[in-house]
Amino acid sequence: MSGGNTKSNALTRKDFLRYMALIAGATITATEFTACESKKDRYGHIKGSMQGASAKLGHQLRDSTFPEPTIIDHVEAVIIGGGVAGLSAARIFQQHGFTNFQLLELEQHVGGNSSYGQNDYSAYPLGAHYLPIPNPNNKALLELLAEAGIITGYDASGIPIYNETDLCYDPEERLFINNRWQEGLVPNFGVSKPELADITRFLAAMDTFRWAKGTDQRYAFDIPLLESSSDEQFTRLDKITMAQYLADEKYTSKALRWYVDYCCRDDYGAGINEVSAWAGIHYFASRKGKAANAESSHVLTWPEGNGYLVKHLKQYSAQQANTQCLAYKITPHEHEVWVDYYDVNTHTNKRIVAKAAIMAMPQFIAKRLLPAAQYDHAFVYSPWLVANVTLSEVPMGSGYPLCWDNVAFEGKSLGYVNAQQQTVRVTMPEKQVITYYLPLDQLSPVASRKYAINLPHAQWVKLIVDDLETMHPNIHANIENIDTWVWGHGMVRPHPGFISGEAVKAARQPVHERIFFAHSDLSGISIFEEAFYHGNNAARALLAKLGK
Amino acid sequence: MHILLLFSVFVIATCGLIYELVAGTLASYLLGDSVTQFSTIIGAYLFSMGIGAYFSRFFNKNLLSWFIQLEILVGLIGGISSSLLFLLFEHAASFRLILYLMVGLTGTLVGLEIPLLMNILKNRYEFKDLVSRVFTFDYIGALLASIVFPLLLVPYLGLIRTSCFFGILNVIVAIVVLVKFKSDIKWANYLKAKAISVVILLIAVFVWANEIMTFAEGQAFRDTVIYTHSSPYQRIVLTKNKHELRLYLNGNLQFSSADEYRYHEALVHPPMLYSAKHKNVLVLGGGDGMAARELLKYHDVEHITLVDLDPSMTKLFKQNSILYKLNDRSLLNPKVQVINADAFQWLKENQQQYDVVIIDFPDPGNYAVGKLYTTAFYRQLRRALHEESVVVVQSTSPYVAPKAFWCVNKTMQACGYETIPYHTYVPSFGEWGYVMASPSALQVQQDSIPSGLKYFAKDVFPQMRQFTADMDNRPVLANQLNNQVLVQYFEDEWGKYQE
């Protein structure tokens, strides 16, 4: 099991010191470490909380034995997991007039990776925070957006018109490079001519891949990912790492390497040395979106991130969703499925007897619930830290003004997103909230998880503030509060051979013809579109099975 | 008598008068009304000298050392006084206080000098002799100062360099005394170090005087500042001269009382002319109440809703007697309802429909204000309109920023409005533009306009719709939240103009 083990191998202070130094890319002395623990330093005024996906509750799965349930409910179908996949499945049920189902969610709220928070000043994302403009052939997703009022209509040539307030407001992105903020994330300011030429060549190559089709007439890289061509000339790219691809194609620019690494870390929580070239290129080449009133590279975003989409999706299971319900055993029978769960609200063990079930959860949990199923270790999950920082003001900095996405060149983190970008107010509220993203890819996922879950809040504060200070010197004085959120298993990681491999193919297969799977990790990449796709597919397969 | 000490008296006297003249000139330059300024500055200065003379009795020991300390301090304070006052002028609310504090301090220190020096010399010379010589040199110094100041110093050195130069002279006196009377002086090395650092500082200010001046003048206003207030949203400054009153928001001119009637008549009367109904009017921005003043000239206007972000702005124009004279107490009129809110947010919550909407926002000079000129905003606005409503938007200068101007026009057209762009000449602004718009075709609906207007008339309007080639329509994009092209056009065009 790849989960963090909090019982044995107690971590020493020295271990944490090494870990912090690894993230910070510097030496952290024991004195500094103690100093911020005792809060006598310049971080002392910063308050905040530590949260995360309910790891403790989840670990009961592994560590506890549960008694036989006495309360038994009968429904036609059950969805286990209230993330985007589970909520999407419920939407399909409702659209088919099928309401006799239950949805079980471990957390206090549905939403999964698209969860969000809210304080006095702003709503803010806790994970996924944007959706690129969908590809024209992704009809199901376009339908969802139209239904949610995000697409307001179509122009004469059938290209969607988006609701302007849902598109990312300008200025969109900036990069802190050579002590100055430049517009856009592709390194440019102070970058040498040969490096710029490398970057241009790379982007042109990605554009060629964007429109390339295989012998099966499918796009080489598409979303949903399973719509992509199976032509070997493209799929062979899944065998090597993205770093290898860059080396093979003789890209030597340091700025380009950083940029591609940043993009991979952004979408997969792991850099070019970890993810496959196919996945790396998919990031650049799969998006072919079109909008009548936006450029194809634009994204849809909201102060609460993809939580906005969850708010729409969750209406379809308003009656059926049960939160704080930990499913611990799923037993297939000849004509039914038994789902045993622990209801935290009432402290009781219950059973749902259904004709069929959708397991809308990642593989590392799914296989634990099914008897005799084996968790395939090909599924690797990247841990993440997301921190919401409340501050009096984001300092100006020199160059391009504050954007939605703000990134530092060669930074340790992925920078920060400004939650209040998406407001139509002229004046900023008294306080601002920025969301800081840090993929925990400095160690193996197992080791990172172990350290990250146990690292004290004061230590996170030091790491985060020091990193923000590289972009904004003295920002610490403006910071009031930092809430950290550790995602132990944030994203499935498309390491070489995984997307084209057998494990993921096998995981997509229903069990006993009545247990269906739905999760973005069945594609091998963790994005909204994939979770939505698998939720839809599983729901349709289940309805077909029940003859609905 | 020691020639050196008499020379010191001469220098001290010259310096003392120079500081007084600098303060007086600076005050009349920055605050206007030179008779009052000079008179009160000289009065305050002489009175402070008296205070200094009084305090001289408390110095009993180490007189030479104290004298040297004093010279260094006078050199420092007198030397940097003008730079300091120029730089602090931007904080005009407390500027007078700072000015008189500086004058008082310099005066007190200068007042100490002569009595202290006489105390030092009293045992070395006959009293009669002492008084006669010291005062002779004192008055000669004063004469010299009053002649060179207007003839040489102000024209050739400027105020900052003049005060620096005389500050340095003061410190040189200190250094000379220090060297000559070395054996009689306590803390000699400490005083030497102090004197040298002050000289270096003053030389630096002398060298960078032009930079200081440019920086300070960039912040200052050319007329008398009569009111300043920093609200959470903006800095409000009112200035006045013989002919006019000017309002600046964040340093940008909003109106001059001399010609604002041109701007506001052109803003309000065309949409009123093109609207069949005037019952319910909405004003967005326009917290100065001038647009409301024009609207109230129509008897069929029953209700005006005025939404302005800044409560301190609307309060000022309700309560200040000079200002409510300018807007004819429009904000106190029972027909006018003032709401302090963020316009876009307010529109989202608004349920009412308006016959005429006057939009008078600040220019789209940043991304925050740029949001109020987007297709998203004009679509939101559409819900506050009926088919025949008429809207007008102040749209910056079509001469300076033609792309920005036509971008506003294009943005409104992109939202399905019929538009009529027009412009007028406002001397304090230059050529200024407006876009009138309606969900349906625009046609003149009124037979007459209120009498007593100073500028606008029905037959003037066709001329206002004419655009010469240098201001004419050009290809631009519509301004959206997700591209904010207007801010870019505006920055490019105004940036070039101001270079």
Image (cartoon, rainbow, N blue to C red):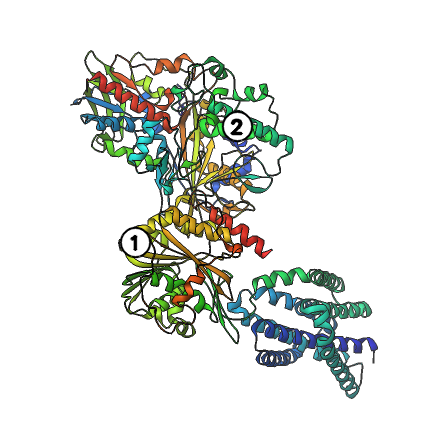
Element at badge 2?
helix
Judged left or right of residue A410, residue B293 is left
Q: Is residue B213 visible?
A: yes
Q: Is residue B192 above or below residue A299?
A: below
- Mark 2 or 1, closer to the camera: 1
Measured Cα–Cα span from mark 2 to mark 1: 51 Å
- Marker disc for residue B399: none
**x%, y% of residue B140?**
76, 82
Element at badge 1?
strand
Judged left or right of residue B136, residue B402 is left
Comparing A218 with A61, the one in front is A218
Comparing A389 with A258, the one in front is A258
Comparing A33 with A27, the one in front is A27
Amino acid type, residue under disc 2 in the picture: Asp
Amino acid type, residue under disc 1 in the picture: Leu
Specify the subunit that label 2 lies on. Answer: A
The 10 Å Cα crowd at callout 1, few under 14, some 14 to 19, many 20 or more, is some
Name of the residue lying farthest toward the bottom: B128
Judged left or right of residue A501, residue A328 is left
- Marker disc for residue A261: 2
Comparing B127 with B94, the one in front is B94
Q: Which residue bears the numbered disc 1?
A: B385
